[in-house]
Amino acid sequence: MTHKRAVSDDSSFYGDINAIEYLNQRVDSFDPDEWMMQHHEQPGWAQPRILPTPTASDLHNPYAGVSYAWQLTESVDDFLARLPPATTAQTSEIPWIYICNPYIARVAKPDSLNQKSKGNEDEGPEQEGSKLDVVIEGGMERLELLGNFLQEVPKFGKPPSTTESEKNKERAQATLNILHLAHVGKVRAGKWMLFCDVLEVNGVWDIVAKATASNELGIASKVAPRPEQGDLRKERLICVYTKDFMDKVDVGRVVQRLKELGLADNKSRRIYYKPDVFTYLGISGGNTWGLKASIYNSSEAFPSGQDVAMAL
């Protein structure tokens, strides 16, 4: 996957050619497949496992026993009445209000590697075989290389417009490397992010929770409770998780259902999709690397399963 960066009139920098080559070699040397090989993992694209459709007696709940999550022993209506987001206070015992899709098997929360990632314990339910620790280590190394590149590039005397173009090329390459690394390491979940007014949050969450439990959306959903401090009128975040950020058919199917439910559109209620690996690495809005914090939005056209079948 290693790529060669040509030094030409359009893309090279004025200044010491050895320094230029050294800087380019450092960022070009990061190869996600090689990184996983060095950590004793098989690179490449894992084939999805086809799980049998469970019967009513074979439902799954990675959050079984977690007090702030829906339990299979209660109805969704009882769960919603027990933990209404508009009035349920956010505490250390209730960081989120959570519901998992019972038709999709995932790793149980106590066994998940993200329990070691402080503040990120409630991202998308983990896929079996996830190597989150390796992905975070490799992702942070790639971000360090990007940070060094961004810091050194202006020193080579190129016009600001060209320098910024080179920075953007490197940001794009770093993003691709990180996403590929996450996919190889089975850190593939991501989420559509909805922000709604506190006066609407109970109603919106009611729709999302019921659609999640009935297998209409993705692998799980969560909503932020009422903050203990700060502006209680602040918009609440609802995350709707999908199984694989690279599965654009599934990502598109979920956002299409959200549109049908009246929770998103292409304009006034445009929503954005963020892969979990970005959250684990601290890639949020206004980040120090200048990276985009999302990879899709609801105004984009996504392929359907029929489109993919016709293309085969």
Image (cartoon, rainbow, N blue to C red):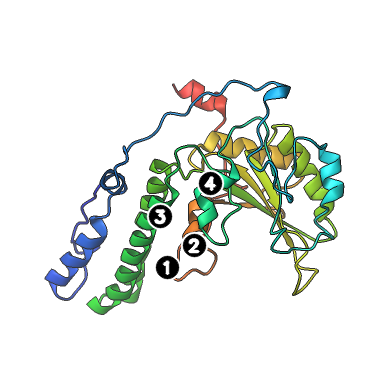
Dot 4 corresponds to which residue?
Answer: 112
CB contact under 8 Å: marks 4 and 3: no
Label 1 secondary element: loop
149 on left or right of 4: right
Q: Which mark is residue 170?
A: none
What whole-number distance in Å separates the C-alpha atoms at marks 1 and 3? Answer: 11 Å
**Residue lying at 66% horizontally and 43% vertically, measured from the top left:** 63
What whole-number distance in Å separates the C-alpha atoms at marks 4 and 3? Answer: 25 Å
Task: Tell me if mark 4 has few (under 14), some (14-19) or many (20+) residues whose alpha carbon lies within 10 angstroms of its own.
Answer: some
Task: Tell me if mark 2 has few (under 14), some (14-19) or many (20+) residues whose alpha carbon lies within 10 angstroms of its own.
Answer: many
Task: Tell me if mark 1 has few (under 14), some (14-19) or many (20+) residues whose alpha carbon lies within 10 angstroms of its own.
Answer: some
Q: Quadrant of residue 224?
A: bottom right
64 on left or right of 35: right
Tell us which disc is closer to us: 2 or 3.
2
Tell us which disc is closer to us: 4 or 1.
4
Quadrant where the C terminus sits is top left
CB contact under 8 Å: marks 2 and 1: yes
What whole-number distance in Å separates the C-alpha atoms at marks 2 and 3? Answer: 10 Å
Dot 1 corresponds to which residue?
Answer: 289
Dot 2 corresponds to which residue?
Answer: 283
Residue 183 percent location from the top left of the image: 42, 43
Q: Which label's residue is closer to the chain start, 2 or 3?
A: 3
259 on left or right of 295: right
Label 2 secondary element: loop
Q: Which label's residue is closer to the chain start, 2 or 1?
A: 2
As shown in the figure, which amino acid type bears the numbered disc 1? Trp
